Image: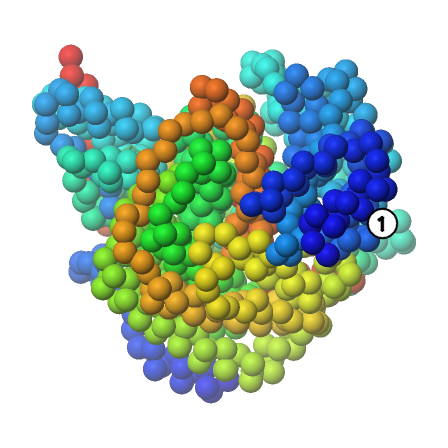
Amino acid sequence: MKLQETLRQVQALWPEVEINMDAPSMTAEIRCKPKEVAPLCDWLFHQQNYHFGGLVVEENGRWELYYLFVGEGERGRIQVRTSAPLEERRFESVSVRIHAADWHEREAEDLFGLIFEGHPRLGDFILHDDVWGEGVEPMRKGSDLKKILSKRRPREEWRPIRIVDVPGAFVMPIGPVFSGVAESVHFQLETIGEEVLRAFPRLFFKYRGVEKMAEGRSADDALLLAERFAGATAFSHALAFSMALEQIRKVEVPERALVLRCFFAELERLRSHLGTIEDICNSTGLAVAASQVGILEEEALRLTGSLAGHRYLFGLAIPGGLSRDFDNETLREAVSRAKGIVRHLEEIERLLINTSSFLDRIEEVGIVRKDQAREYGLVGPVARGSGYCNDLRKLQPYAAYRAFEFRTPCEEEGDGYARLRVLFAEVRESLRLMEQALSELPDGPVFVESEPAAGVALAGVETPRGTTWHWVRVDEEGKIQRYRLITPSFINWHGFHLAAENFAFQDFPIILATFGLSVAENDR
Amino acid sequence: MSRWVLKGLQTGVVTTRYPAGEELSPGTTPGLPQALPCGEAESEALISRCPTGALRRAVGQVAVDHARCVHCYRCARGIAEPLPWEKGFEWAIFRGESEVPKTFERSLHIRVVDAGDCGACLNEVKLLNNPFYNMHRLGFFITPTPRKADVLLVVGPVTYHMETALLKAYEAMPMPKLVMAVGTCALSGGIFGPGFATGRGVADLLPVDVEIPGCPPPPLAILHGLLVLAGRKPAAQSKEPTVAG
Ligand code: SF4
């Protein structure tokens, strides 16, 4: 069903809502009363099969809440918007009906002080209870930094709540500092001996308050935050932020830049997946395979570095295009080197799928079912390994993706092996996309100047870990008023506990590795 | 299993010749911008482009404070007179009070703590065990327990949520112990700190012995830092710019 048709039905079912549609961009906003939000979202998600995108909260003299939904092609994108005076802090929880909204609402509760009625609140989330006193709401407009800091309680101990109540059961804490080289995150493993019943992550040790820090900064300064809050996938996030600004400034990015953006986004995906595959090999103790893939990861980093100057593509994506051009000969050489990397990876893949001791470790481990993946709104290779096949490059193509031929690899089993196969297949598709980008690369500039302008925009990018949404509001002076980051790691960490139920203790690192999560990207 | 052994043998040796020889492969380092002798007007133009205050006017030139540089390339791209970039990687600066004890000469055990990095610094640290860098050959080992560690390697601006864990890891280490701050965030807070949830680097909390600038510093730069701690390579000269009077 097309977007118009869906909207007609909405109007018939909820006659009082106000609908605005922007036909060229296939986006619509439905403005409704707070009490209509939950049933309307429920209908879009469960009856109309829209994907849940996330929640954006704004404080612009009033509360403004936007629940985001994404459809395929002509089904477009819908934001359900509601508003209430600032004294009103209570909203009906959507997460009771759409579980994917769970963490979004918890975050809004923690950082804005909103109350979502019916939400089974769990307290301690982004702001850790052992570090902050009561009443700290950093995302509120005009919240005073000094006041916030006076509520800080450094060096207090945090005690986990025990959840399992079985004789002999205990909770094993891991982290935040653990293993050899690992991002900081804490886990509580509820266990009775060898068998682990559940594993819950406690995140946000790396919370830097990026969304708040962006407020009041110029777009150029905020771009640095967009690019560096999750530096391992810097290009994708800098691209999403740049695209949001381009929408606000109404600039047409030159064709050559659009194609090159795909080229570098795919190079980043290729390199990032190599890192994840290496981690998976490592987690099973297959040292030779890990170091073989590690060689390829470093080769991809060197390729990136020699091509673009920076190994992680910092400073390349900017509003209006790219910060520099590349000559076609250099790009051709880069593609042939990338081909060599993928050829080697395929050799390793063939060896891996014939190594039964390896397969034994990742098959039927960490299973996420398709219905769970959809209910949690999972994204990226994790979702696609469970047969929940969403890919923003296909759903709502951006940059030059519409012009390219490629496949979104999907598997059905939802276990660690399925996720690994998706990663292998995606590396091949990325190479194919790079080749096409090169062969269809138009001449011309890679950058166009643009004047700062006020406005609001939402831009999405399929990062290596899945879809990200960057919501940017710019004021009359060109300063960022609100920057909301919805990231694939935030979405997929929410679903991580699904894969970490009733497993043997030694499988924990494997389950974790096959999820390929970034903590920095989650914590922001 | 034998197939894997074969595969390993086929690959041959890829390990860098550094520190015995030179490493010149392209793409191993992003390099760093260097001071540029120039007039007042040009230097003003350059300085105003730098978003982090890494550029300063010094006598007859624009000087670069590498501890603040985040590789945004705004002093290098889109302008007529860009800053020169140097492709080296021996950037580690010694900040310790006295000489490093001789006991560390042969081997170092390293406890890595992520105090809020973006993932790039940590990935470069991870690569030290990659066959290309293979730091075991130099006697450097990453250890999961602070009780066996000689060096605390810290990345990230130190978020408030990580302060306790960082201090605990340090306290758990036996004496004598060394601290290495890796990456612009760990050196100065970078673009994140000081903020309402983040401090401005490791030195506010712990005595730092070696600082490695870079956003992120490549594996070779981190390796150089470890070699400095082990007394096997000289540190880079601290490039504190002389501010024009
Ligand atoms: S590359 Fe470094 S010195 Fe140059 S403008 Fe950016 S932060 Fe400043």
Q: Which residue is mark 1?
A: A164
- Residue A470 shown left or right of residue B188 in the figure: right
Residue at 50 percent of width and 68 percent of height: A406
Q: Position of residue B64 (x, y in %)?
A: 23, 31
Compared across the picture, whether A211 is left or right of A192 comes to left
> Which is more toward the observer, A180 or A71?
A71
Q: Is A42 left or right of A506, judged from the image as shown?
A: right
Q: Which quarter of the picture shows residue A418?
A: bottom right
Q: Give the residue displayed 39% in from the left and 45% down from the top.
A: A253
User: Nearest the camera: A420 or A280?
Assistant: A420
**Quarter of the image where one finds residue B181:** top left
Scheme by which the image is coloured = rainbow
Above or below residue B26? Residue B214 is above
Count neighbours of disc 1 (C-alpha within 10 A) and say few if under 14, some if 14 to 19, many if 20 or more.
Answer: some
**Ligand 1 quadrant?**
top left
Q: Position of residue B37 (x, y in %)?
A: 10, 29
In the rendered view of the protein, which quadrant contains the C terminus of chain A? Answer: top right
Q: Residue at 43% x, 66% y: name it.
A: A433
Residue A326 in sight here: yes
The mark tally for this picture is: 1
**Residue A67, image quadrant:** top right
Q: Which quadrant, please, contains the N terminus of chain A?
A: bottom right
Cβ at disc 1 under 8 Å from ligand 1: no
| Residue furthest bottom in the image | B2
Quick check: A257 above or below B11?
above
Q: Is residue A278 visible?
A: no
Point 75% across, 18% down: residue: A85
The chain that hosts pointer 1 is A
